[in-house]
Image (tube, helix red, strand yellow):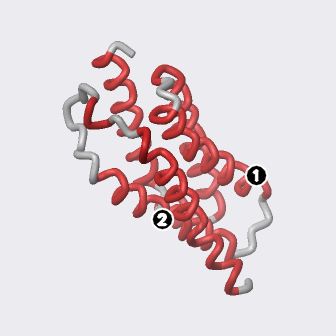
Amino acid sequence: MKKGISLFYLFFPLIIGGMVGLFISNYMDYELLNLPPLAPPKIFFPIAWSVIYLLMGISYYLWQKEQFHDGKVSFFYYLQLFVNVLWPIIFFALKWRFVAILWILLLDILVIYLLSLFSKEKKVCSYLNYPYLLWSLFATYLTIGIYILNGI
């Protein structure tokens, strides 16, 4: 595997996530919302997502390094990443809170399915994404809680 391609797999989720973060920064209203219990401070989100995006990149890099040729894994990896990066646009920029609930539920399903696909070929790739699944489920709780508490 060429070094440039390796770096692409490692950092692509982080770069895409960072770009979306910059895009939505002017639309962020998190601190103005009524938040459910356990809601972390705003500063926690870029830290958590950076770690998660790096773990995603590492897992996909390891999977690609083994040169598995299951197109299904690649398809669902990029599909869940696409769904992931659209969620903050739906939630913050468009303020479509109910749609954001449906969207994040879709993301949860895709992440669970991706973990099952990873675990069939290379379990470590699946394990590296457990924090992602946990964070996604927590984000689902926050999304639903914000929708309920803000009546929007």
Q: What percent of the width, then of the height, locates residue 37?
A: 20, 31
Q: Few, some or many C-alpha atoms within 10 Å of disc 1 (few <14, some 14-19, many ≥20)? A: few
Residue at x 79%, y 56% (from the top left corner): 71
Q: Quickly name the residue at label 2.
A: 55
Relative to 65, 21 lies left or right: left
What is the three-letter code of the residue carrying label 2?
Leu
Quadrant placement of the C terminus? top left
Residue found farthest to the top: 151
Check disc 2 and report its element: helix, strand or loop.
helix
Q: Quadrant of residue 66?
A: bottom right
Q: Nearer the viewer, residue 103 or 114?
A: 103
Instruction: Identify which residue is drawn at 62% across, 46% down.
Output: 80
Q: Is residue 21 depicted above or below 59 in this figure?
A: above
Reading the image, the residue beneath label 1 is 72
Q: Quadrant of the N terminus?
A: bottom right
Q: Quadrant of residue 121?
A: bottom right
Seen from the viewer's position, the closer of residues 84 and 24 is 24
Can you give x and y, in whole percent of width and height, for residue 104 in the image? 51, 33
In front: label 2 or label 1: 2
